[in-house]
Amino acid sequence: MVSTRSVRVQPPSEGGPVGADDPSVGDPPPSDDDGEDDDDAGTEPSNGSSLPAQVVCVHQTPRFSISPSLSQGRRAILDYSIPKIAKLYVSATKPLSKTEFDIKAGALTPLLSSLALRAREHGWHGHGSNGILKIPNNITIPNGASKSLIKEYGQISLPHIRNYVGTFANTKTREVQDDEALYQCLKVSLTHEAMAKINLYETEWTVA
């Protein structure tokens, strides 16, 4: 932001050049400066009038993203101590639908469809190999070929998923934040009966 000041010039009297009949133009009046520094010196003209300040705002080029969450960067750590960033967690962990989902075969398709939308919004299932729901075929090559846990879950073994999660578990990374948000989202989106069934196998799908 740049602050500038503009000086207004008095118009000349009729028939004469600028300053011809204007007593304010010419030799300055005697100074009454007593030698002490004046904090306001230079901020106002000698005639004591107050000059308007003009503010020029410089706008940065907007950074494109498809959602507020992705505007932080796909792999950037989210600082939840910042209120506006904390709202991203609230948005990510809210129920997928007003109606809770079961885990029976007939309810799986609408559940995964709703989850895919949430995952896209928050970067859990991004383009390419980005996102925790994109499981690398080779966990030692995280940016290599991968499979979608949403679309190709039948082609990925549970031990392989556990090994993949083990590469970032207990780290201070965006993957851990996304993993927690995903869990909280699913927990409030499934029926109590569905969660009860899933919790029976908790030791199989959790990584300490």
Image (cartoon, helix red, strand yellow):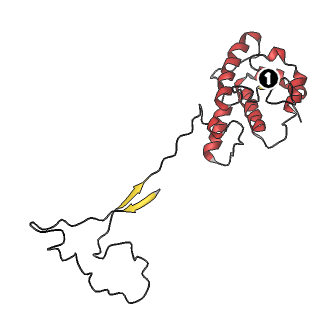
Q: Nearer the viewer, residue 80 or 66?
A: 66
- Against 170, residue 54 (above or below) is below
Q: Nearer the viewer, residue 4 or 68?
A: 4
**x, y (%) of residue 117?**
65, 23
Q: Nearer the viewer, residue 40 or 108?
A: 40
Give the residue number, with chain letter if any, for mark 1.
Answer: 146
Instruction: Give the residue displayed 85% in from the left and 37% down from the top.
Output: 169
| The furthest residue to the left | 15
Image quarter for residue 189?
Answer: top right
Q: Nearer the viewer, residue 195 or 87?
A: 87
Q: Amino acid at mark 1?
A: Ser
Q: Left or right of 59: which side holds 169?
A: right
**x, y (%) of residue 93?**
68, 32
Q: Is residue 201 visible?
A: no
Instruction: Give the residue displayed 76% in from the left and 23% down from the top.
Output: 192
| The furthest residue to the top | 106
Q: Secondary structure at mark 1?
A: strand
Image quarter for residue 101?
Answer: top right
Instruction: Give the residue displayed 67% in from the left and 18% down from the top.
Output: 113
Image quarter for residue 155?
Answer: top right
Q: Left or right of 167: which side holds 185?
A: left
